[in-house]
């Protein structure tokens, strides 16, 4: 609980932390007053049952009880409204901190399988975290401070009963801890499974055309969607059932403790060592204590689930951002130099293993190699989707880490295989690259990228919404939009991952022309899959198992008669550039 409060306060700014402190103090005050109110019953009964009745003392204690009840209610109203204030503070700060942090994470971190968990964290997770100060903390704080006050007070009534209460409280605390551990373990599994099935559902909906094209309804290697939903249901019912067993254990312990204390008190009263008013006071305290403690037990599962949500937010906030320079350096040119570049995903084995290459400014470089050689990874490192594990990548004589992400993004335009077009018109999708671009600018880049013929064909031209046009735009046409967008950005370096999918001859020729245009006065690095692109390149880097095994131009590599030449002749026969690992053996 202390850890949960500490995490909460980490999420808040100074004003929010002040609100949180005041709210906690008010709730603790509430608990103490509740405990005192019931403890005061014993002296009140003693004043009433003394012979003769001591009305003076009776009214003093009755007044004290009335004052505690009234103040308790004032604090209750105050802390409840503060709870909503802190909940709103947490919500605002949560979104701002997460949003800011996500913006600093390496682009490569945003893998498809993270969509589900992030979506869930920003939706349900947000509400879970805000729920803690708004609804839960009061019950937790009062559930601890009220019984603690009553237990301490009971030592004043009779030390033996006080000791029994203290031992019982310890047992109840252990049972509560057990309940929370059970919930935490099972909630972790449940959250994992629900994140996986959320990602699978999104994938299932998005990838229908591919799945149907191959006559399957699912990706068997990942298990069926039904299986992932069944796993989620399984972990949900385990959470519920095991949580229920934890609750039974907790409430059983509580009942046992209450029965033992009552039996002890009655026994001590019967043998004359405890007075009747003390017995009545203890009985009232014992029964009243059940209320906040039971609420604590009932809410323990929810508290744990919400505390887990905070834990996940902390984990996400702990993902190291890409280090950014305080003052980004200015590159002298757009030549690229890679020295001893090594990289492995998530600290795993090296996917690129000692890459050395020089890519002169204004050159057109094609990267070729078998599937899985590391070609796309190399492109991603050049775009600073990740930082290298070892070595350096320099643009214009400056390490990309000195240029910062914004600097690298300003210098590069990226055209990747999976062209993502945002909801909006074709013009909107292009203007993402240059919001102030005029219609004439759009027409100019469309001509170069051969997008003009696509726009002319569409009934609403530039104003065709991409959502509607999704079905009418082919893969090649989408890549033309992407190339036009890169042209509009007018960045000096273009990173292009050529589509592997087979294109019709018209699209293939259009894209080849567009790439040639792109390369006219820019530094272009293409992961090339088409023979026409490879031949057009000034330089070819042959990548195999994370290393550059050959480099040169088409003629020199053919003449060398090595891997490239073998691939070239094979692919020429196959009419396409689809290298496979087997080809190298
Ligand atoms: N996000 C990722 N996390 C972990 N491993 C990855 C990730 N992306 C790629 N890899 C692995 O890195 C290796 C190189 O992948 P990369 O996509 O760079 O190869 P490639 O040469 O571009 O292949 P292809 O031509 O098939 O696209 C592969 O073994 C791949 O499984």
Image (cartoon, grey):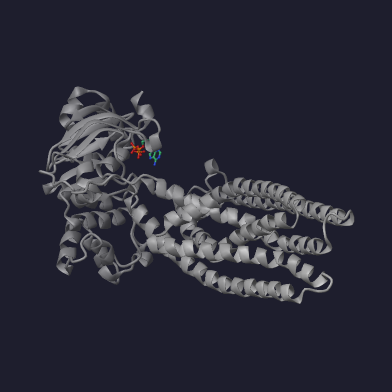
Query: Which quadrant does the C terminus fall into?
Result: top left
Residue 352 locus on image (x, y percent): 31, 32
508 or 363: nearer the viewer: 363
Residue 34 locus on image (x, y percent): 65, 66
Q: Residue at x 38, y 57 (%)?
A: 97
Q: Residue at x 13, y 41 (%)?
A: 396
405 or 513: nearer the viewer: 405
Q: Residue at x 84, y 71 (%)?
A: 51
Judge from the rendering whether residue 343 lies leftward or rightward of residue 93; answer left or right: left
Asked where in the image residue 444 lies, by quadrant, the reply is bottom left
Q: Is residue 238 above or below residue 375?
A: below
Q: Is residue 477 above or below residue 467?
A: above
Q: Is residue 91 visible?
A: no
Q: Is residue 243 visible?
A: yes
Judge from the rendering whether residue 248 lies leftward or rightward of residue 135; answer left or right: right
Q: Is residue 376 above or below residue 100?
A: above
Q: Residue at x 22, y 54 (%)?
A: 486
Asked where in the image residue 98 lies, by quadrant, the reply is bottom left
Judge from the rendering whether residue 263 lies leftward or rightward of residue 316; answer left or right: right
């Amino acid at each position: 609980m202390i850890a949960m409060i500490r995490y909460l306060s980490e999420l808040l700014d100074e004003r929010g932390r002040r609100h949180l402190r005041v709210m906690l103090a008010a709730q603790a005050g509430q608990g103490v007053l509740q405990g005192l109110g019931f403890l005061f019953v014993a002296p009140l009964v003693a004043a009433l049952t003394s012979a003769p009745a001591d009305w003076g003392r009776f009214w003093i204690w009755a007044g004290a009880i009335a004052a505690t009840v009234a103040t308790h209610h004032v604090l209750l109203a105050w802390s409840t409204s503060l709870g909503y204030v802190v909940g709103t503070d947490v919500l605002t700060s949560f979104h701002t901190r997460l949003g800011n942090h996500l913006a600093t994470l390496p682009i490569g971190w945003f893998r498809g399988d993270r969509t589900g968990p992030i979506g869930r964290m920003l939706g349900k997770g947000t509400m879970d975290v805000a729920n803690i100060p708004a609804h839960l903390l009061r019950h937790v704080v009062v559930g601890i401070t009220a019984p603690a006050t009553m237990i301490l007070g009971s030592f004043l009534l009779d030390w033996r009963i006080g000791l029994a209460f203290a031992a019982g409280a310890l047992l109840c605390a252990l049972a509560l801890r057990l309940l929370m551990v059970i919930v935490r373990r099972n909630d972790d599994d449940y959250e994992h499974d629900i994140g996986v099935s959320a990602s699978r559902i999104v994938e299932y909906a998005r990838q229908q055309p591919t799945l149907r094209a191959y006559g399957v309804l699912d990706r068997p290697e990942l298990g069926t969607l039904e299986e992932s939903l069944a796993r989620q249901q399984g972990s949900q019912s385990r959470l519920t059932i095991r949580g229920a067993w934890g609750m039974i254990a907790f409430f059983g312990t509580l009942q046992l403790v209450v029965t033992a204390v009552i039996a002890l008190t009655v026994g001590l009263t019967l043998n004359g060592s405890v007075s009747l008013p003390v017995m009545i006071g203890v009985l009232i305290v014992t029964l009243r204590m059940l209320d906040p403690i039971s609420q604590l037990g009932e809410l323990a599962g929810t508290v744990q689930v919400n505390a887990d949500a905070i834990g996940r937010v902390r984990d996400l906030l702990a993902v190291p951002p890409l280090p950014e320079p305080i003052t980004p350096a200015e590159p002298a040119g757009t030549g690229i130099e890679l020295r001893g570049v090594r990289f492995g995903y998530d600290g795993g084995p090296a996917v690129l293993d000692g890459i050395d290459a020089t890519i002169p400014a204004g050159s057109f470089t094609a990267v070729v190699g078998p599937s899985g050689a590391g070609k796309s990874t190399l492109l991603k490192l050049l775009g600073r989707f990740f930082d290298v594990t070892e070595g350096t990548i320099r643009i214009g004589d400056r390490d990309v880490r000195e240029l910062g992400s914004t600097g690298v993004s300003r210098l590069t335009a990226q055209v990747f295989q999976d062209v993502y077009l945002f909801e909006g018109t074709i013009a909107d999708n292009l203007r993402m690259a240059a919001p102030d671009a005029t219609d004439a600018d759009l027409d100019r880049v469309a001509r170069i990228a051969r997008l003009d013929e696509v726009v002319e064909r569409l009934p609403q031209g530039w104003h065709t919404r991409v959502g509607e046009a999704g079905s009418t735009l082919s893969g090649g046409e989408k890549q033309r939009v992407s190339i036009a967008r890169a042209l509009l950005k007018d960045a000096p370096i273009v990173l292009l991952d050529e589509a592997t999918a087979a294109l019709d001859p018209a699209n293939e020729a259009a894209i080849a022309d567009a790439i040639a245009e792109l390369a006219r006065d820019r530094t272009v690095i293409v992961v090339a899959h088409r023979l026409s692109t490879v031949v057009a390149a000034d330089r070819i880097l042959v990548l195999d198992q994370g290393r550059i095994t050959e480099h040169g131009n088409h003629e020199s590599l053919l003449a060398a008669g090595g891997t490239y030449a073998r691939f070239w002749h094979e692919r020429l026969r196959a009419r396409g550039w689809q290298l496979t690992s087997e080809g190298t053996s």
